[in-house]
Amino acid sequence: MPNSPIPVITIDGPTASGKGTVAQKVAQHLGFHYLDSGALYRLTALSVLRRNTPLDDEHALAKAAEHLHCHFNGAHIFLANEDVTNDIRAEAVGNMASKIAAIPTVRQALYGLQLSFRQHPGLVADGRDMGTVIFPHAALKVFLTASVEARAQRRYKQLIGKGFSANMEDLSKDLTERDARDSNRSSAPLKAAPGAYLLDTSAMTADQAVEQILSWHAAAKPI
Ligand code: DC
């Protein structure tokens, strides 16, 4: 129904809270599109890291975001025509993404691209500001959290599984620093949107979290 409003479910939360896995499963279950907004910041970070763009050159950073040549094909993520699905998950890229994400002109440059993912029959969008800034009128908003220990454990497994080396102590320190940076920045900080359902997944499997979100979705009013 091309003229009916396109439903959006936003899933925000800190790094390694499991929101990516959960959001993809919810999207798959409902047959909705999926936006991994963190991937857009990571793609921008990878592109500027490769060009050695200095962090204080905000103009060049915003230009890199504005001219991001990327596309998504199933689980694969491409920068220009190169498959960078694994490269963007490196900790160095995540840390750079968190730094450039604090710059308002970089966020502004990625705004339109994020909106363009809202297509029929619906969208599940995950990130930090999906419910607060990008899709403030979403029919269902979820804020996913988990303890630092649970998140470090998940990130450790994820990195080892992708062939990166990892160390729990460094990961916990990195997560805590990144949380502080993402939550304390003045532009679109990480926080629960008004009306968001809070879901602590420390002691939950991804499938249990998915089930909870699907039941909230079933009870939510269509927009
Ligand atoms: O979700 P992630 O770890 O892939 O995101 C990488 C970084 O991108 C994260 O540290 C903060 C930033 N980000 C953001 O500022 N806003 C979003 N909507 C998504 C990610």
Image (spheres, helix red, strand yellow):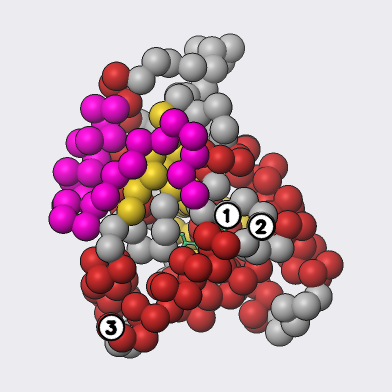
Q: CA distance from mark 3 to mark 1?
A: 26 Å
Q: Which residues are magenta?
A: 191-216
Residue 124: x and y, percent?
A: 43, 38
For residue 15, which quarter of the picture?
Answer: bottom left
Circle 2 Cα neighbour tier, 10 Å, few/some/many (<14 / 14–19 / ≥20): few
Tell me the residue that label 1 is attached to. Answer: 189
* Element on which disc 2 rests: loop
Q: Label 3's element?
A: helix
Q: Residues within 10 Å of mark 3 (few under 14, many from 20)?
A: some
Q: Check contact, mark 2 vs mark 3: CB within 8 A.
A: no
Residue 31 to residue 176: above or below = above
Type of residue at label 3? Met
Residue 198 higher or lower than 223, as above or below: below
Tell which tag, 2 or 3, sits nearer the viewer. 2
**Residue annotated with mark 2:** 186
Residue at the spot 83% in from the left edge and 67% down from the top edge: 59
- Identify residue type, mark 1: Pro
Q: CA distance from mark 2 to mark 3?
A: 29 Å
Q: Nearer the viewer, residue 145 or 41?
A: 145
Residue visible at 73% across and 50% down? 108
Ligand 1 closer than 8 Å to label 1 CB:
no
Q: Amino acid at mark 2?
A: Ser
Q: Nearer the viewer, residue 86 or 23?
A: 23
Q: Is 177 or 171 nearer to us in this picture? A: 177
The percent coordinates of residue 135 (x first, y second) are 56, 35
Q: On the image, numbered disc 3 is attached to which residue? A: 168
Task: Say if residue 79 shows up in the picture.
Answer: no
